[in-house]
Amino acid sequence: MSLVYIEYNFTVTPKDPATEILIAELGFLGFESFVETDYGVLAYIQKEEWNDKLLANVGILGSEEFDISFEFKEIEQTNWNAEWEKNFNPIQVLDKVYVRAPFHEKSDLDYDIVIEPKMSFGTGHHETTHMMIQHLLDLDLEGKTVLDMGCGTGILAIFAAMKGAHLLDAIDIDEWCYENTLENVQKNNCDNITAYQGDASLLGDKSYDVIIANINRNILLQDLDKYSSCLNEKGTLLLSGFYTEDRKIIEEKCIGLQLEPVNFYVKNNWLSLRFRSH
């Protein structure tokens, strides 16, 4: 029997960063799939998880900074991959990294990453993922141990493995992301990546040469102490998932943990920071 979904069609002005915030808030309410459009986003939730007062808990809908309107309708189960095939285009980073879906032709760039286009975060299209790839391009990862925290599709762990990282852990709290990471790890033949579903509490007394955390400001601030304690001497910490106006609070926290700022990238007001441990 087919599942029945409620499809919300949101029109968002201005689109950035409101769409990203909207998706995050909807995800907490049980919306399980999203397709970005030219004017906003389509969001899907199973009918049994829905009620007509659900959006009362979405804070951004009451914001005066953005104009957000929507309509919704009931639909039969959607073929998500068919939706993505209409909207997913390959990307290049600095003419060295190519991120594509299985239905795109292989590139002749240095790194060719295949990402099954499910609804997990991290196809390379978002500014934060793009900047993290730039940071990883700057690093010598040969033989290094790497943690990809909030891994989404697993794209950053996969790229680190392609660059020679030895042992890698990829962790995400979301079951869909965990399963998608497993799938993408297999598609890219990265048998040295181990995926886990959970949060920073899984880290225990593990240690890494490089820690990648592309999440959001509040989770980063909450977990930075743990990341710092898991970082080897002269290790590298890469952070993203926040805006340029968050730079001061993130840097102050890291400096207080004896982490030295090294480099940063900015893309459309999104920020990515690189730190080194002493």
Image: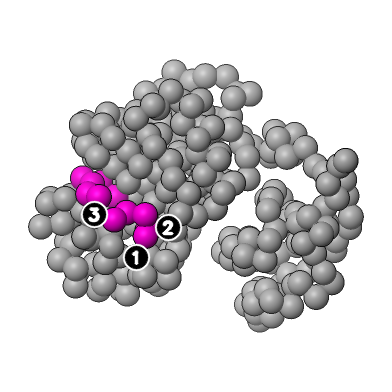
Magenta extent? 199-211
- Can residue 161 be found in the magenta stretch? no
Residue 173 visible in this rendered orientation of the protein? yes
The residue positioned 22% from the left and 37% from the top of the image is 144
**Residue under label 1:** 223
The residue positioned 49% from the left and 55% from the top of the image is 173
Of marks 1 and 2, which one's residue comes earlier in the chain?
Answer: 2
- Tell me where residue 36 appears, x and y as whole percent: 68, 50
Crowd class of label 2 (few under 14; some 14 to 19; many from 20; radius 10 Å): some
The reply to whether dot 1 and dot 2 touch (C-beta < 8 Å) is yes
Of marks 3 and 2, which one's residue comes earlier in the chain?
Answer: 2
Residue depth check, mark 1 versus mark 2: number of the one nearer the observer: 2
The mark found on residue 205 in the picture is 3
The reply to whether dot 3 and dot 2 touch (C-beta < 8 Å) is no
Amino acid at dot 2: Asp
Q: CA distance from mark 1 to mark 3?
A: 14 Å
Residue depth check, mark 1 versus mark 3: number of the one nearer the observer: 3
The residue positioned 52% from the left and 19% from the top of the image is 106
Of marks 1 and 3, which one's residue comes earlier in the chain?
Answer: 3
- Tell me where residue 227 appears, x and y as whole percent: 28, 59
Q: CA distance from mark 1 to mark 2?
A: 9 Å
Q: CA distance from mark 3 to mark 2?
A: 14 Å
The mark found on residue 34 in the picture is none
- Tell me where residue 3 appears, x and y as whole percent: 83, 46
The mark found on residue 199 in the picture is 2
